[in-house]
Amino acid sequence: MPFLTFFQSVDQRVFSFLNFFVNLKNLNQENKTLLSENQELQGENLKLKEASLENELLRERLELALPDKNNLILADVAGYLPQSGQYFLINKGFDDGLREGLAAVTANNFFVGKVVELGSHWAKILLMIDSDSLVSVISQESRVRGAIKGDHGLGLVMEMVPIDSTLQVGESVLTSGLNNNLPKGLLVGRISAIEKKESEIFQRAILEPAVDFSGLEQIFILLPAAP
């Protein structure tokens, strides 16, 4: 019958229309679920990448020729404090075994600075480029001793070098081990220029720091060697 056929056709269209919205709702829920799972996977992937980077940093550290008894503490650089001097703020402190005067280094054995203030789970690292930093050093090839200090955060200068000593442009400068808690042999930088005046009893050298401080995210703190 025409009327029955008409109502059956309308009923089928209504059913199809309702079924479309049900499927649309289910699809929307599936998309939300997939989005949530995708976000979780992205979060896990980021964690794995960070863990991989940290493991690579530790592997680099283990390949260095430091004394066997040195203990290392890996710390994150949590902040940079240029307003009060050249300082890093890190997320490790007294409760983690840190003490004032300990050396901070990168994974490739480059000297960064030293611990000057700390709390239970934080510490301030005075960077070697700060003008208040003073570290005893020795040039690697010519074996000339001196002391490096920061040039107002702009670079490094090696001072207290006798005028008759021979330095070489391009040679490396290392920590000498004469400072308490600072091991011998940490790379400080390389000599880029030498300033000498005959009327002076000391000469000085301009150094290019080995460390790119702007790119540091993690550093190591060197604990004293066990007795």
Image (cartoon, rainbow, N blue to C red):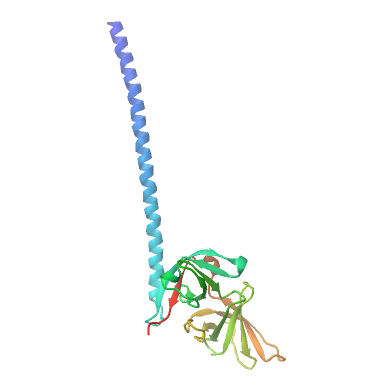
In the displayed structure image, the side of residue 213 where residue 75 appears, left or right: left
Residue 221 position in % (x across, y down): 45, 74
In the displayed structure image, the side of residue 184 where residue 195 appears, left or right: right
In the rendered view, tell whether residue 9 sits above or below residue 88: above
In the rendered view, tell whether residue 206 sits above or below residue 92: below
Query: Which quarter of the figure has residue 21?
Result: top left
Residue 58 position in % (x across, y down): 39, 70
Residue 51 position in % (x across, y down): 38, 62
Q: Nearer the viewer, residue 29 or 82?
A: 82
Quadrant location of the C terminus in the rendered image: bottom left
**Looking at the image, how many numbered discs can be counted on the residues?**
0
Residue 3 position in % (x across, y down): 30, 6
Q: Nearer the viewer, residue 157 or 96?
A: 96
In the rendered view, tell whether residue 74 sits above or below residue 14: below
Query: Which quarter of the figure has residue 2?
Result: top left
In the displayed structure image, the side of residue 58 where residue 157 appears, left or right: right
Q: Nearer the viewer, residue 109 or 81?
A: 81
Q: Can you name the residue that lies furthest to the right here?
A: 199
Quadrant location of the N terminus in the rendered image: top left
Q: Can you name the residue that lies furthest to the bottom here?
A: 164
Q: Residue at x 41, y 74 (%)?
A: 72
Q: Residue at x 56, y 80 (%)?
A: 190
Query: Which quarter of the figure has residue 9?
Result: top left
In the displayed structure image, the side of residue 206 where residue 32 appears, left or right: left
In the rendered view, tell whether residue 76 sits above or below residue 62: above
